[in-house]
Amino acid sequence: MAIPRRGVITGPLPMYRFDPLTGFWGIPHAERMIAFEGDNGPVIRIRHNSQGNRDREFSSFKGKRNFLCLGGSHTWGAFVRDGERYSDILRLKTGLNFMNLGHPSLGLDQICITLTEKTNQYSPEGVVVEQYPWAFHRVLTSFVNGYLKPCFYIDSCQELQVHRLSPLAKYKVYRNVVGTYQALKKELSEFKNDIDIKSAYDPLTDPVFLLWKQKYYEYGYELFARIAKRMSEYCVRKKIKFLLFLTAHQQQFLCSSKSELIDYHLPLEKLRLVLSRYHVPFVEFAPALLAEHEAGKPVIMPDGHLNAYGHAVVARELKKELVQREWF
């Protein structure tokens, strides 16, 4: 097969399609060669199993102890080959079945629905949920990559509720019309709060790091923590072990910010506060990742995704944490 240009995707199928529960999900048996932007290594072959996940067939694990790995593109393994992700390493190091159900661009809201409505068939003993601190605000977004998604909200009685997808969301025209409206509505809300992430965006001055613009994001942090609490409580009811872990985002690897009013550790600090308030079991791997990161041996790709070494660090730290919590 000819090697494609950098940044292009080749293959007979798209990798994702509409899903009535989460908005979008992997296409079963899809296979493509992907050249990630900025990747200097070989093009990576991506394969989905019969359930649309980037992993081996789950049916081959019958009779083994199952542990689910849920998350976004870090868990899915952007930039890394099969076998290099933290879930693959844990499977090898422990002899237990760590099943990868990560998908790019999934927000914690979609991950919550995945846990409560897509995973019963696996009878998991434990669930680990990866979250990239910068991406907490995905819970405020209802239109992603051309797909609508279910969204949680806090009602007037301070109860957590969810807007489910309309059956019409399977139609692209409907998604585009409603999605455009939702995107404009979100943009207007940001404009009213003096936030502009559409034009001349600079990741070093992203509003989530600006101390004077945090009032706008307070609801997002609260919503994130409420969703995490729902996941934790669901696992308690089902007698499933649960742990959420936070990685480090690209900007945290810089020595300093441009101003004392810009704090690249702010999302992690805010998440630590709200998750603790709701007694959600969580652990931070930013200290380990930052300590291991060196110019000649980085743990992330230029865009902030974990590279193979970063996955190895996460696997090592996660294994220590799970042993300490007596998961196995």
Image (cartoon, grey):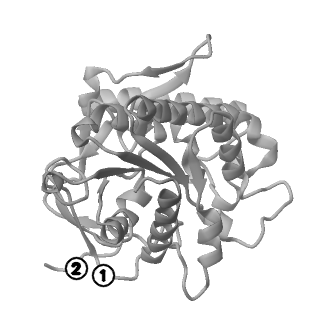
Q: Residue at x 71, y 30 (%)?
A: 192
In which image quadrant can residue 170 be found?
A: top left
The x and y percentages for residue 77 are 37, 63
Q: Earlier in the sequence, mark 2 or mark 1?
A: 2
Q: Label 1 belongs to which residue?
A: 42
Q: Residues within 10 Å of mark 2 (few under 14, many from 20)?
A: few
Q: Position of residue 134 (x, y in %)?
A: 59, 52
Helix, strand or loop for disc 1:
loop
310, 199: nearer the viewer? 310
- Crowd tier of the residue under label 1, counting other residues whose Cα lies within 10 Å: few below 14, some 14–19, many 20 or above: some
Name the spot of residue 42 as percent of width and height, x first.
Answer: 30, 81
Mark 2 and 1 residues: CB-CB less than 8 Å, in contact?
A: yes
Query: In the image, 253: left or right of 316?
Result: right
Give residue 112's mark.
Answer: none
| Residue 118 horizontal side relative to residue 155, left or right | left
- Location of the N terminus (image quadrant): bottom left
**Mark 2 to mark 1 CA distance (whole Å):** 9 Å
The residue depicted at 53 percent of the width and 58 percent of the height is 324
The answer to whether residue 42 is left or right of residue 40 is: left
Where residue 235 appears, as percent x and y from the top left, is 42, 35
In which image quadrant can residue 294 be found?
Answer: bottom right
Find residue 3 and name its label: 2
In this rendering, which labeled residue sits more in front, label 2 or label 1? 1
For badge 2, the amino acid type reads Ile
Residues 276 and 297: in front is 276
Residue that sits furthest to the bottom in the current view: 296
Q: Quadrant of residue 290?
A: bottom right
Residue ID at (29%, 76%): 5
Vertically, is 43 above or below 130?
below
47 is higher (above) or lower (below) than 4: above
Placement of the C terminus among the 4 image quadrants: bottom left
